[in-house]
Image (tube, grey):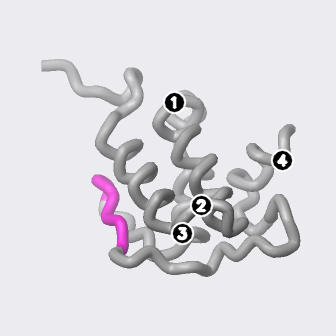
Amino acid sequence: MSMFEECVIDHTAAPSEGASWDKHFSDPILTDDGVVLETLRDAGAYISRLPDTVYRSEPWRAATHMLIEAAEGAASIELARFAIGRALALKAPDSQETT
């Protein structure tokens, strides 16, 4: 298992000593299933509970990457927030409803 996957699966793990998972988003993120994500830790926990097919989709992999970068201070928290919002909006092919 890579450090990237371990960090998301066990959201208390950090890829570096300086990572901070308790940073708050400027505005909480409300998911379609009613979960409110207020911190990077909340977002990591949410991502770790996604079905594998959803988690491995490009939008969620990008969101996970930005989340880790934000925790390490290498990216802004708002960039991570944007990536999570994008992943929530772009459903994985297995989760899209047919019309």
Would you name the residue on which mark 1 appears?
A: 58
Given residues 9 and 14, the one toward you in this image is 14
Work out which quarter of the rendered image holds the N terminus and state it.
top right
* Cα separation between marks 4 and 2: 18 Å
* Cα separation between marks 3 and 2: 17 Å
Q: Amino acid at mark 4?
A: Met
* Nearest to viewer (mark 1 / mark 3): 1
* Snapshot quadrant of residue 67: bottom right
| Sequence-first tag of 4 and 1 | 4
Point out residue 13 in the picture as x, y percentages from the top left corner.
80, 64
Would you name the residue on which mark 3 appears?
A: 42
Question: Which residue is located at x 53 percent, y 65 percent?
Answer: 76
Would you name the residue on which mark 4 appears?
A: 3
Residue 75: image tag: 2
88 horizontally vs 20: left or right: left
| Sequence-first tag of 1 and 3 | 3
Secondary structure under tag 4 reads helix
Mark 2: few/some/many CA within 10 Å (<14, 14-19, 20+): some
| Sequence-first tag of 2 and 1 | 1
Question: Which residue is located at x 83 percent, y 59 percent?
Answer: 15
Q: Amino acid at mark 1?
A: Glu
Point out residue 41 in the picture as x, y percentages from the top left corner.
60, 70
Q: Amino acid at mark 2?
A: Ala
24 horizontally vs 82: left or right: right
Question: Which residue is located at x 70 percent, y 62 percent?
Answer: 11
Secondary structure under tag 2 reads loop
